[in-house]
Image (cartoon, rainbow, N blue to C red):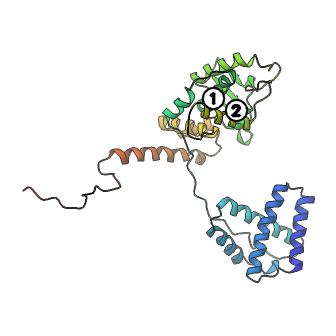
Amino acid sequence: MSPAAEEMLANFLNQLKFEKRASVHTVSNYQRDLERLSSYCKEKLIFGWTDLKQADVRAHIAARHRKGIGSKSLQRELSAIRSFYTFLLKNSLVEINPAQYVKAPKQARKLPKTLDVDQVNGLLEAGASSSLEIRDLAMFELFYSSGLRLSELSSLDMADLDLSDRSLLVRSGKGGKSRILPIGGKAVTAINNWLQERAKMSAIGDSALFVTTKGRRLGQRSIELRLSLWCKKKGIQEHIHPHMLRHSFASHLLESSQDLRAVQELLGHSNISTTQIYTHLDFQHLAEIYDKAHPRAKKKPDNDAGQAKPSKI
């Protein structure tokens, strides 16, 4: 690239850093992404930003995709390029934004990993032998009982519970939306056991439901670590994270009820298409049963398949 082109890039990064007050992480990512684009331009003998065409941006992204770069990373790179050209347009340094209509390859939607009912029972019926484990069991029961997000469980206050009605209030779910959720009987018992222990942890005046031994609200990272420690102590080999319990809640409920709208409301999804991924899990489960049970569903033929057997007639 020409010295003038390099100066334009430096000016953009300075604006991002000092005027826009973007985070260090954002500036670092943008710089790295745009330096990759600059290297592409040098390789293709493109010396100025006005010479970069839409086909060049598309070819650059395609080359990155062939190297195994994921869709989300490519979307971020395109965002960096668009932002840079928006800056150039505002300063009348270019006439078009060549990245405006370029899209990153779509990413295959991954099915969430879930536990089966026996695995959940093994996790939750492992037994609690200390005050902290009683607290932890109450948290894990609540994850699975009500399908809570990690942030939602961490932010629960004592006032959000109505154990007589077996319900809880999520005040600030995703998108700032609140919702009321039922609490299962096992979770109610576990919470009542925890509340007896909580009273001993100097938590007077603290509104948080789940607290540390010093009476402070338990943070999200601490909850993740406690679940990991629980699995290790109980001899559970599989890596289990809090969201896996939420996924299991949704999958098991949908499998039993077939009520997609109800599951959507319980999970707090604003769009039902987000909930529909659990229907794929349900079908996957049914497909596995079909493959194992149906006499003509086996994918691999028997060793003597295809060989004609002599007729007895």
Crowd tier of the residue under label 1, counting other residues whose Cα lies within 10 Å: few below 14, some 14–19, many 20 or above:
many
Q: Is residue 121 left or right of residue 4?
A: left
Can see residue 178? Answer: no
Crowd tier of the residue under label 2, counting other residues whose Cα lies within 10 Å: few below 14, some 14–19, many 20 or above:
many
Picture quadrant of residue 189 = top right
The structure residue drawn at horizontal position 69% and vertical position 69%, both measured from the top left corner, is 102
Q: Nearer the viewer, residue 70 or 53?
A: 70
The structure residue drawn at horizontal position 48% and vertical position 38%, both measured from the top left corner, is 255
Q: Residue furthest left?
A: 313
Task: Please tell me the numbered disc located at residue 142.
Answer: 1
- Quarter of the figure that contains the N terminus: bottom right
The amino acid sitting under disc 1 is Leu
Report x, y in % for residue 116. 50, 37
Report x, y in % for residue 87. 86, 68
Q: Nearer the viewer, residue 7 or 146?
A: 7
The amino acid sitting under disc 2 is Leu
Report x, y in % for residue 85. 81, 70
Q: Are marks 2 and 1 in contact (CB under 8 Å)?
A: yes
Can see residue 11? Answer: yes
The structure residue drawn at horizontal position 56% and vertical position 40%, both measured from the top left corner, is 238
The structure residue drawn at horizontal position 69% and vertical position 64%, both measured from the top left corner, is 74
- Classify 194 as above or below 236: above
Quote the CA–CA distance across marks 2 and 1: 8 Å
